[in-house]
Image (cartoon, rainbow, N blue to C red):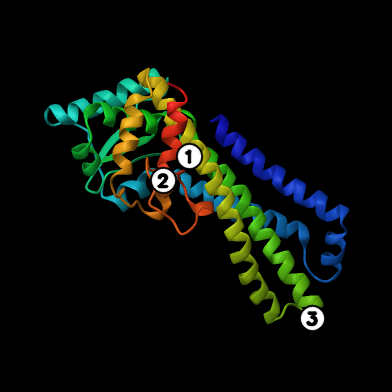
Amino acid sequence: MKRIVLLIATNLAVVVLLSIVASLLGVDRYLTQNGLNLESLLWFSLLMGFGGAFISLLMSKTIALWSTGAHVITSPEGAHERWLVDTVHRLADKANIGRPDVAVYEGEPNAFATGAFKNSALVAVSTGLLESMSREEVEAVLGHEITHVSNGDMVTLTLIQGVLNTFVFFLSRVVGFIVDKTVFRTERGIGPGYYITVIVSQIVFGIFASMIVMYFSRRREFRADAGSAQLLGTPQPMIGALMRLGGMQPGALPQALASAGVAGSPGWGALFASHPPIEQRIAALQGRS
């Protein structure tokens, strides 16, 4: 709940900050005089930037189950499912969070955690990961995901995404309006130059926003690895799990869950990768030995 309050407060602070900066630079007077209501745009940007991110967070468990085809284990069948559920619950108790739902889905080695609240999260593991790793390594991966939940990483990334969405939405329209008036010389209303510039600006600003989000995503992976080592009392199981993942092709997750997995698929640029290289993660854990 504290992180949800922080999410709302931060986005409100973003609107206030944008308003103050625009006032100091005289941008608000220029835009108001030329037909753009800056205050309305600020609040609309807040609604679009924060609203979309927040709704996605609230629906994250449903989207995750639907997109991966995962099934929640409500009544464990057999010793293997019982061990999986008991291990997740034991780690959750140790991390002092509510016991999450446990799910399994068909796919190549990977696992993820999601949910809006740390006391009602979802931890899902692929059949490929369960089949390719020892129980100790699977436990380390589960500790990694439980740490994501206990750290509130899902809400933190939503907070960052919401703030950046607000900036992208607001700035692209301000730039579009200025270009339309000064370059395309539109005198009444807004012309095609506004829409063209908004689209281009939103793409460019969106690219930079993605780089920032992925930077924070990579940092949280190091913390989750360290959290797993702390929960298990040793970094060796997580090192072993990462070494095993390093020799496999990790299972691809839907885009909405890509940053939630224990391993990420190679991207087209290091700045856009949701996960650090496995070698760096292993080195960081070895430094804790």
* Residue 281 visible somewhere in the drawing: yes
Q: Secondary structure at mark 2?
A: helix
The quarter holding residue 160 reads top right
Q: Secondary structure at mark 1?
A: helix
State if disc 2 and disc 1 touch (CB < 8 Å).
yes
Disc 2 to disc 3, how far (Cα)? Answer: 43 Å
Question: Is 68 drawn above or below residue 242 in the view shown?
Answer: below
Residue 262 coordinates in the image, percent (x, y): 37, 40
Residue in the image at 63% along x and 48% along y? 163
Amino acid at circle 3: Arg
Question: Label 2, on which residue?
Answer: 60
Residue marked by disc 3: 188
Residue 118 in view (yes/no):
no
Of tags 3 and 1, the one toward the viewer is: 1
- Determine the CA span between mark 1 and mark 2: 9 Å
Residue drawn at 76 percent across, 82 percent down: 184
Horizontal arrangement in the rendering, residue 31 relative to residue 117 (left or right)? right
Q: Which mark is residue 154?
A: 1
Rate crowding at label 3 as few (under 14), some (14 to 19) or many (20 or more) other CA atoms within 10 Å. Answer: few
Contact between marks 2 and 3 (CB within 8 A): the answer is: no
Name the residue nearer the viewer: 155 or 225.
225
User: Crowding at label 1, few (<14), some or many (≥20) Cα neighbours within 10 Å?
Assistant: many
Q: Position of residue 153 (x, y in %)?
A: 49, 36
Q: Residue at x 49, y 30 (%)?
A: 151
Q: Nearer the viewer, mark 2 or mark 3?
A: 2
Is label 1 or label 2 in front? 1
User: Residue type at mark 2?
Assistant: Ser
Residue flagged by tag 1: what amino acid is it? Met
Upstream in sequence: badge 2 or badge 3: 2
Q: Residue at x 69, y 54 (%)?
A: 43
